Amino acid sequence: MAEPFIGAADAQELPPIEAMSFEQALAELEAIVQRLERGQLDLEASIAAYERGTALRRHCAEKLREAQLRVDKLTLDAAGKPTTTPFDTPQ
Amino acid sequence: MPTNLPEYTVSELSFALKRTVESAYGLVRVRGEISGFKRAASGHGYFSLKDDRAVLDAVWWKGSQRRPAIQPEDGLEVVCTGMLTTYPGRSKYQLVVEQLEPAGVGALMALLEERKQRLAAEGLFAAERKRPLPFLPEVIGVVTSPTGAVIRDILHRIADRFPRRVLLWPVLVQGDGAAEQIAAAIAQAGRLPERGEPPRPDLLIVARGGGSIEDLWAFNEESVVRAVAACPIPVISAVGHETDTTLIDLVADRRAPTPTAAAEMAVPVRRELAQQLDALAERAAAMLGQRLAGLRHRVDGLARGLPEPVLLVAGATQRLDDMGERLTRAAHLQLERRLAALGRAGAALRSPGQRLDEAARHLALAEQRLALRVTQGLVAAGREGERLGARLAAIAWEARLGAAWERVGEVAQRLADAARRVVEARRQRLEALAQLADSLAPARVLERGYAIVRAAGMGQILPRRAAALAHHELDLQFADGTLAVRREERRPRGRSVGQAAQERLL
């Protein structure tokens, strides 16, 4: 994964958050927190980084909310095409 | 040759032989190695059993092939149970196999080892082929039996950790056709379109509970191993117990010791991720807060180092006050000097006195206006100073102080210059007036040949003939002294001369 960015100036070149996987977003958030903790950024960059971190967190939280168990059984229909039917978990 | 031997036809002998063989041996168990195995289109299997000195043909009718533990293949040592019979049509005898089993675990293990070496040589089990599992799969495919504990354990553990969508490929996990179904399911999962319906899973779990090596044999089949190797989706194998190693375990990207462990490898724990996320967000907020607090502290520290804004302009204010005072004083001094000069001039000449008074009034007014302007200037400068001071305090940058100082000084200088110019202009005007007054002084007029007529004894000035007629004795005042004269009545002719003289006098 590319070094996640940070200054405000090149904010446009960052990958769009909506397209990121949970893992990518979490990794960038971690990198941002570490940079903030190392105090390497000037104030403006710090604020920009914080804002991006907030957006990343929201994205991650959204991914975590999409948690729902759904089990489908795969069968082939008459045309030999795979289709699904709900599957009841054996108890 | 004896001729009392009974004579058989070929068929009689062949069938007699068949009866003898079948009755003599009936059901037998024969141990040997499979050789030349062929499955005909009819489904029947034909092969030879051999050992180091003999070969026995065998036929395995399709009807006897229900759920064999293993698939027969060349080189496999097996124990076959069946009827020994002959085939009169071809002068052959053969074993009709009822049951085919591997000749003990050792035989299966030997076969497994040979197959493993072969597939390993192809690189199918190489570490560099292993793919990382997705961190958080959206869709998980599970290839296993739809009944039993395995699927239940997997689903429960996924639901506990991070509920996801699960696609189940129900398959036989042992016996005839199991390997084919498993291989087909794996291949089908890989062929699904990535975002179609049903979607291609991000991860595949191939699972089966524990069992004997024969029970697990389907997962050693080459078709299954190759299907996993060709699958574009990362695969977790969870077959049998931890101690049973099947070939699918070697080719899979990860091997789980149990189905439950496979579910744990498949998804992270949602609650832990949420906590991790919260902790990160808190750290970020704390860091930014600390950063801001630190900067605020530094700004406060710098601001404390700055002088009070009032003090910043105090010097300038004082200079302005001083200058204003000096200006007023100078103006007063000038005015007094001029007024004194005017007074002197006025004492010498009465008639321009009014103009001098007027000039004095003008000057007084000018002085007042000047004083007012100086006061206004001071007030404005004071306000400007305060405004600058306030701005300086707000901005609080040391670098700006020098500039502010310069600006205040400059304003003060400009004000002083302006005041100086006003005073100079007034002074010049005053001098012009003084010169005028000077030129009008009576002494100067008398120098030019005029005389002043007064009543005798240096009395009242008589500017008119009519007034002079009232006096007989008059004083004529010249520049250098007075001449007393007596007025006499003359003849009209002389009077006209006297008149002319008188007029000339005046």
Image (tube, helix red, strand yellow):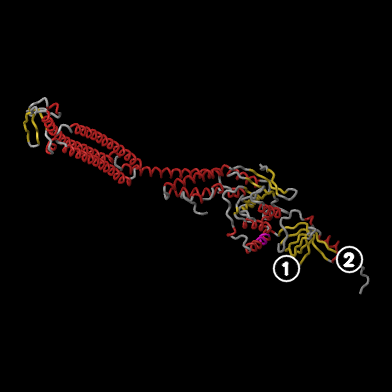
Left or right, residue B480 beside residue B270:
left
Label 2 chain ID? B
Q: Kindly report the secondary structure that dominates the magenta region of the rendered protein.
A: helix
Q: Which residue is mark 2?
A: B13
Label 1 chain ID? B
* Mark before the other along the chain sequence, 2 or 1: 2
Residue type at mark 2: give it.
Leu
Left or right, residue B120 beside residue B305:
right
Residue type at mark 1: give it.
Asp
Does the segment drawn in magenta span residue B460? no
Residue at the extreme bottom = B1
Nearest to the observer: residue B307 or residue B217 = B307
Nearest to the observer: residue A70 or residue B446 = B446
Nearest to the observer: residue B13 or residue B428 = B428
- In the image, residue B336 sits, relative to residue A23, either above or below, namely above
Q: Contact, CB < 8 Å: mark 2 with mark 1?
A: no
Q: Residue B311 occupies which quadrant of the picture?
A: top left
- In the image, residue B21 sits, relative to residue B258, either above or below, namely below
Helix, strand or loop status at disc 2: helix
Helix, strand or loop status at disc 1: loop
Nearest to the observer: residue B105 or residue A10 = A10
Q: CA distance from mark 2 to mark 1?
A: 31 Å
Disc 1 crowd rating (10 Å Cα; few below 14, some 14-19, many 20+) is few
Q: Which residue is mark 1?
A: B52
Disc 2 crowd rating (10 Å Cα; few below 14, some 14-19, many 20+) is few
Q: Taking the image as drawn, is residue B27 in sight?
A: no
Q: Taking the image as drawn, is residue B69 in sight?
A: yes
Which segment is the magenta one? B108-112
From the top left corner, tell me how far across and down residue B21 is, in percent: 83, 62
From the top left corner, tell me how far across and down residue B416 is, in percent: 25, 41
